[in-house]
Image (cartoon, rainbow, N blue to C red):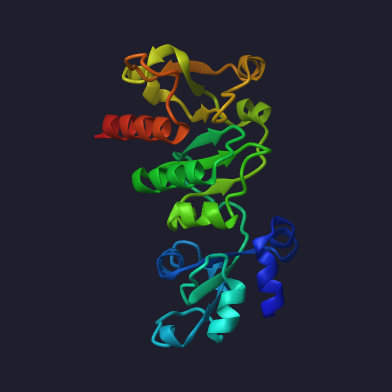
Amino acid sequence: MKLEEIRKLHQKKFRQEFGCFLIEGEHLVLELQRALPGDPRLNASEIYLTAEFAHWQTPLPVHRVSARQMAQLSETRSPQGIVAVVPLLPAAEISPATRALYLYEIQDPGNLGTILRTLAWFGGFRCLLSPNSVDVHNAKAVRATAGALFHVPIEADVPLETLPARFRRIAHLGLAGQSISTPGFRDFDCYVYGNEARGLPREALAGIRSVAFTIAGSGAIESLNVAASVNICQYELARART
């Protein structure tokens, strides 16, 4: 790609137009390269680097740019000297045993990044994002994933009402319901989490026949952060497998 086109990838409309997104920094590029054997489609990625990364070892195409050009490509105040242009890909095929975590209108890129890191750590789940959720490919979200987006199948713009056609048993987290420590919590195909401020719409939940579960707490505060809730639940599910 031309450098002026790469700069445009900072905006969602151009990511969609060009069919690719930008990652920046040594760690993210390393995670991209680690993911290549598992998803050969990522070999269409290209790396742009400055002289300080001339030693970089990679099977991907490499383009050398000046420090000034790198500053124009970067979205950070202190460019790290290496970026990659990565194709936007539909979620890779996965095992039928893989379950799903559904996020309803999640807005904070940091929360999304943390959740994807948790899913990558424990494995066994894909991530579904509802319409009106934060774009996982925007710069803040990409950085927050720390490369986890290359290791978790992600589907965007999945309407909540389509879940029953795909998943036989659906659970959601709320203030009411059984404790996640009950054995029944382990038996679902899809787990639904709500928006940071508004939670989940009650009418829609009734329509998808979702079963409610809760994380037991002291009640000193009104609710848990959505990323913290996912972390606790995924740990509980992973613990149940051991």
At x 69%, y 61%, the residue is: 15
Q: In this view, does 137 lie above or below 87?
A: above
* Residue 211 pos. (x, y %): 50, 16
> Residue 1: in sight, yes or no?
no
At x 55%, y 87%, the residue is: 66
* Residue 25 pos. (x, y %): 45, 69
User: In the figure, is residue 236 to the left or right of 17?
Assistant: left
> Residue 122: in sight, yes or no?
yes
* Residue 10 pos. (x, y %): 65, 62
* Residue 184 pos. (x, y %): 37, 18
Q: Can you tell which quarter of the image residue 85 is in?
A: bottom right
Q: How many labels does the image show?
A: 0
User: In the figure, is residue 240 to the left or right of 136?
Assistant: left
At x 42%, y 33%, the residue is: 230
Q: Is residue 218 above or below residue 101?
A: above
Closest to the observer: 157 or 112? Answer: 112
User: In the figure, is residue 109 to the left or right of 2?
Assistant: left
Q: In this view, does 206 lie above or below 228?
A: above
Farthest-out residue, left: 242
At x 60%, y 55%, the residue is: 138
Q: Can you tell which quarter of the image residue 224 is in?
A: top left
Q: In which quarter of the image is the C terminus?
A: top left
Q: Is residue 233 above or below residue 177?
A: below
User: In the figure, is residue 13 to the left or right of 178?
Assistant: right
Q: Quadrant of the N terminus?
A: bottom right
Farthest-out residue, front: 77
Closest to the observer: 43 or 70? Answer: 70
